[in-house]
Amino acid sequence: MLQWFILLNFLVEFGSSQIPPGCDVTTTTGYRYSQFHHLHSSPDGTMELRFRVMAKSDAHIVLTTSPLVLNPLYEIVIGASGNNYTDLRRTMTGRSVSAVKTPSLLSDSEFRGFWVVARQGEIEVGREGETLPYFHWKDADPLPVHYYSLSSWTSTVAKWIQNCDFGGKTSWLTPSDNSSTEDNGSLGPQSEESYYNAEEKLKANLLATYNKDVRPATDHRTPVSVFLGLSLVHFDLNELTSSFDIHSTFKMSWRDERLKWNSSAYENVTLLHFPSHTIWQPDLKLFNGVVASDIIHFGEGTSNLVFPDGAIMLAPPPISLSTMCPLDLRMWPWDTQKCTFIIGSWTHSGLGIDLKLSNIYGDTELIPENALYTHNLYVTNLQWELKEFNASIHKFNDCPENDGSCSNYLYPEAHFSFIVRRKSPLYIATVTVPALMLTVLTLVTFALPPNSLEKVLIGSVNLLVLSIFLIYLSSLLPPMGDHMPLVVSYLSKTLVMVVLSLVLAVVTITITRTPRMYGPPYWIKNILTGVTGKILGLQQIITLVNRVNGDRTSRQQQSTDDYTLHVDAGDHDVNLVNTSTDQRIQAPVFRGAVEAMNPAELEWLLLAYGLDRLAFIIYFFTFMIMMAMCF
């Protein structure tokens, strides 16, 4: 009942409106294609449809190959999404393949005219009185459409005017200069020139015989010079994906002799805006992009600026480009990377398109500063610092003979290179300082007595922290197949050295804590008590060992069993005690001795001290060499 009530209101309100003679008036309610009509066909195979519609939103037009609703087809929706978009679908109620934002394009209080053209897979939609479309899409697999049908959407009503006898003109779609449909809804015939201003006439004349598929060269053997320029807005380097991303304004300019005009003949029109699909453009591609990226069509709304001398500039808004960047992380986190964008024609050699650097920007090395100064758009990266930027043109030979004899195979490329250096204050605090502290902690273990169990405890903690640290770095860095960051190499070698220090700690603890009646071999004792022991800083314990042996053989003339080692509980001083007379002899203080340690065990303690001191010296110089190579 509600739909019939709405339909009745339409008939009452607009029943007296003036309708052009020979036109059909159709009212659609809900979403259904019931009546099919033949599309108007031109001799060149162009299918054309002209109509007017009055609806709140969602005016549906379907173009089909037969008078049946069978997929695939072209479904055009004007005023979709609440009268905010015009979109095109390849199937009924399917996914949109292309859409443009057209707010408030339809009206539920007046008729508004449109035209639809289908030509070899190209679908164009335009407004009444305009020769250029506001919507354009090209199908890679064109459908031979011959029929159309009209519909509205669920719970909406649309009123259509179609199938008018145009007589070769479209003036019925355009209000006169002295009246409008807002005043009286009149659709009376007007003169064809009434809606053409100087700019529209100029565009129509320029495009009358224009072929956008042909290069704009006076001679087919003459290349078209295309000037390129780039202004950087922001950049970012992703190590995990080895990709370099920039946000920039990319501009191209060239000259098209077919688009020249005398501005004085067209009311001093000195600039025209052409949609990207209406004139020829160079087929430039980003060769080393992360994804297939076409840097010609930057999206809806991008226009070419055309000047009277035929000069053309494509100046889209800032775009995002992403390229593969081979990373060298050996010096991480103090590394410097070089990433290059390679842009060139996909199909034309140097005989078709000749790439050049744009002189609009002046010196190409000043492009980042120019963007920063002139447009205030350049945004610095918090992690990376831009050290250098340069642009150059390279030509590579794709000749099968590879002897340079065939110049037709020279392909020009534009290289835009960025050299960036990592800012590393954060990594100094999170990587460098912890690595150095773990090194110090490894050396500190050798300052403990050889028989101290704390050596094993500190070494185990050090081993655990290093393992966790390496796992953290593996999650932070990408896996590199040909090299390893020097910092990671340093930490992995430190891990090996910590394990060896733990093994040494177990050996020294075993040596000093095992009860023994005989000392180490004489040649070992001789080395440790000689010059080598003094170099290793074992003078105190050597003095004690010599005193024990000297008292036993020369001064005391008593057996070894008459002397034992005693450690005071209070001050931990080490003394020699004569068991027969209970006479205490003060010895130099050293750590690692225990009560009741006999002279044989004291000699093994000397050996443990020697191993520790020797390992400390080796570790110290090894760490110094590793740090000099890695930091």
Image (cartoon, rainbow, N blue to C red):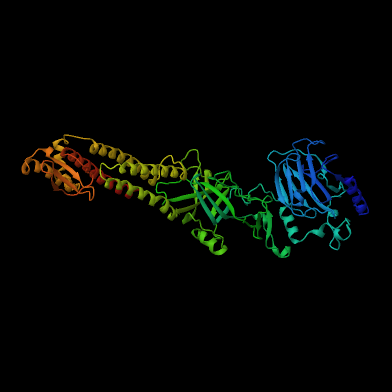
Residue 245, can we see it? yes
The picture places residue 390, in percent across and down from the top left corner, at 48, 55
- Determine which quarter of the picture holds residue 511: top left
The picture places residue 306, in percent across and down from the top left corner, at 66, 58
The picture places residue 312, in percent across and down from the top left corner, at 63, 56
Left or right for 548, reference 286: left
Left or right for 122, reference 244: right
Left or right for 518, reference 428: left
**Which residue is painted at 10% across and 43% down in the image?**
581
Return the residue nearer the eye: 526 or 227. 526
Residue 23, can we see it? no
Return the residue nearer the eye: 23 or 87. 87
In the rendered image, which quarter contains the N terminus?
A: top right
> Where 508 sits versus 124, above or below?
above
The picture places residue 331, in percent across and down from the top left corner, at 40, 49
Return the residue nearer the eye: 571 or 409. 571
**Which residue is painted at 80% across and 44% down in the image?**
61
| Residue reaching furthest to the front | 581
- Determine which quarter of the picture holds residue 93: top right
- Determine which quarter of the picture holds residue 607: top left
Left or right for 188, reference 519: right
Return the residue nearer the eye: 161 or 490. 490
